[in-house]
Amino acid sequence: VALRNANDAVGALRIMGDAYGSQAQLVTRMSELAEQSANGTLSTVQREALDREYRALVAEYGRIGDTASYNGLQL
């Protein structure tokens, strides 16, 4: 039983680590978009495109957080 519990914990930690890694990549990209948008050289149309991408990344970040689960347990 202890071995099974340990294996379950390892599996849960792997999934959590993968979810965290994905979210960290999203945050990095969001930071890049914010920096590009704030530099003052882009047109309104270009900044709107960056904003759409940023909003999509925010949604994906939330989706990952909402759906990361292991064995029916939300992580």
Image: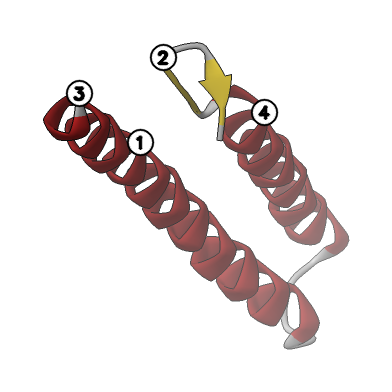
The residue that label 2 is drawn on is 71
Quadrant in which the C terminus is drawn: top right
Other residues around mark 4 within 10 Å, as few (<14) / some (14–19) / many (≥20): few
Q: Residue furthest right?
A: 44
Other residues around mark 2 within 10 Å, as few (<14) / some (14–19) / many (≥20): few
| Disc 4 secondary structure class | helix
Q: Nearer the viewer, residue 75 or 35?
A: 75
Query: N-terminal of the two: label 4 or label 1?
Result: 1
- Dividing the picture into quarters, in which one does residue 67 lie? top right
Q: Residue at x 48, y 62 (%)?
A: 24
Q: Nearer the viewer, mark 4 or mark 3?
A: 3
Q: Nearer the viewer, mark 2 or mark 3?
A: 3
Amino acid found under the numbered disc labelled 1: Ala
Name the mark on residue 36.
none
Q: CA distance from mark 1 to mark 2?
A: 8 Å
Other residues around mark 1 within 10 Å, as few (<14) / some (14–19) / many (≥20): some
Amino acid found under the numbered disc labelled 3: Val
Q: Residue furthest top?
A: 72
Question: In the image, is 17 to the left or to the right of 35?
Answer: left
Amino acid found under the numbered disc labelled 4: Asp
Q: Nearer the viewer, mark 4 or mark 1?
A: 1
Question: In the image, is 48 to the left or to the right of 69?
Answer: right
| Disc 2 secondary structure class | loop
The residue that label 3 is drawn on is 1
| Circle 1/circle 2 CB separation < 8 Å | yes
Q: Residue at x 54, y 21 (%)?
A: 73
Amino acid found under the numbered disc labelled 2: Asn
The residue that label 1 is drawn on is 12
Query: N-terminal of the two: label 1 or label 2?
Result: 1
The residue that label 4 is drawn on is 66
Q: CA distance from mark 2 to mark 4?
A: 15 Å
Q: Nearer the viewer, mark 2 or mark 4?
A: 2
